[in-house]
Amino acid sequence: MDTFAIGDRHFLLNGEPFRILSGAIHYFRVHPDLWEDRIRKARLMGLNTIETYVPWNEHSPAPGTFLVEEQLDLGRFLDLVAAEGMRAIVRPGPYICAEWDNGGLPAWLFSDPTVGVRSSEPGYLAAVGSYFDALLPLVVERQVTRGGPVILLQIENEYGAYGSDKAYLQHLVDLVKRHGVDIPLFTCDQPFGTMIEDGSLPELHKTGTFGSRSLERLAFLRERQPTGPLMCAEFWNGWFDNWGTHHHTTDAAASAAELDSLLSAGASVNIYMFHGGTNFGFTNGANDKGIYEPTITSYDYDAPLSEDGHPTAKYFAFRDVIARHFPVPAEVPAARPLQPESVVTVRSTLPLLSVLDGFGSAPEVAGPVPTSEVTGQYRGFCLYECTLDRGGVLAFSEVRDRAQFFLDGLPLGTLSRELGERAIVIPSGGMLQVLVEDQGRVNYGPRIGESKGLIGPAALDGDELIGWQIRALDLEYLDFDGAGPFTALAAELDGSGGVAGPSLSFATFEADGPEDRYLRLDSWTKGNAYVNGFNLGRYWSRGPQRTLYVPGPLIRKGRNVLAILELQGSATCDVRFVSGPDLGPDEK
């Protein structure tokens, strides 16, 4: 078996100096049939290690569960890393940020208001203990000391930017060691102020996170850690996008020059991201520093390997830099082939509000308006209903995050958290229905763990409304072939005009077999798209992204089903498959 240790100046693999040349790939953002391809392309760029976060909330969507199938098969992912002859770094959190829903913390955890967040509060620690009980055996058996690829394990994640609870950090250290983790443990924090000290312990190896001024950041790190190898655990070579902004890019040559500075200084590096992947379904996070900003579906990150797994100019610039310092394979990945374009026409549709019974019952909740967590569903959509005896101005403390209002089935308007809207005029009495979309839970800062839905009190002209009904709308998977009662209710369309929202619309298309596609929904407004039941993620006419990535393994030979959840309405029944991705205009 191999050994891996931290020396006075170097990482030591079997007692010999070892430079970590790592790239981040989040297995949960990539179709599992494509893991091997992405890992191999990391090796071809000259990397020797793959780093990944572990999203607690994805593995544990409900208390007492831990899923490891398909896209969550961390063991298989790490085995593929090993098969490629590479090492692995695992960052299990429990908090990961990652622009991921709730920073990876399960929303169900905070249904108990006494549970702490990223602290030594007993309820929180008990939940973390159960999570690590399920997760760590998968990692321990794949440590380098047991013949596996894993050489480092992270404790928490940039904790110095959040708190300084040393008892909490020590608890995590003791916990992972009790489970048999015997590889080095590390922390990563930004090299500013006291973050590095606050986010770590004396026994833990400290690393930095930054994307510029590399020599200055490394010097800051060395001042606070006089011995041990220097490492940038997140070399930010790109950035993520929010809805309504431009597509963030960084200059390939400038990023490559920073990487060269790092390597010339003798530092190890983890490129964040090497390959970003996609926020499929409802998994995107959000930021809120006074304004709520949900993250888009694409997590391309302007990374060296694009969202759909093809080398970019940055890939080759980084490869050239690495080749100045280390041997690099001669083989290079092929460029993206142009895919044929086609038009697909929606042929049937049905109003979402007409099929509510297909989503189960809506029990009445006594008292004030509840948050969406009472449904036991922690992502996506829920529907509120309340019978009003009169009209007036209906106001809430807050709307999280986007609410569409209907009175006796007729649309009244929309309230948006992003715009700070909290009140709407109700013209008369009747059956009020409110379709609320959770656009992504905050993944960074003090609003982690907050509730979703309509935040009370709900007051009609100052009088609090009570006696609400609420139901979860399970729209995580949507396949017309298996939609049951939806099939009989769908109205046929002739392909002209558009569709009203909120609605479910369906189309079919033919394919020769698995191949990447890029779905463009011009003249559609907002919603989610599905291929053969798989939720590709959110689209929105405000951009920046204009296409949704359809991984090739989702496409089957012959007939395929496209389903569209449109919330507002479209001006057309057509969508297009186009030749390549369009993530929107950049900031230049």
Image (cartoon, grey):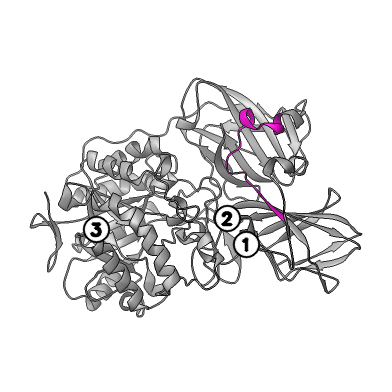
- Camera sees residue 201: yes
Mark 1 or 2, nearer chain start: 2
To which residue does mark 3 refer?
152
To which residue does mark 1 refer?
452
Which structural element holds mark 2? Answer: loop
Residue 451, horizontal then vertical, whole percent = 60, 65
Tell me where the magenta segment starts and ends, as one range: 470-487
- Comparing 402 with 218, the one in front is 402
Kind of residue indicated by mark 2: Tyr
Mark 1 or 3, nearer chain start: 3
Does residue 321 appear to the left or right of 303 in the view shown? left
Residue 261, horizontal then vertical, whole percent = 25, 61
Q: How many marks?
A: 3
To which residue does mark 2 refer?
378
| Residue contact between numbered discs 1 and 2, judged by CB atoms under 8 Å | yes
The question of residue 568 being in magenta is answered with: no
Q: Which residue is at 38% across, 44% downward?
A: 305
Residues packed near mark 1 inside 10 Å, few (<14), some (14 to 19) or many (20 plus): many
Residues packed near mark 3 inside 10 Å, few (<14), some (14 to 19) or many (20 plus): many
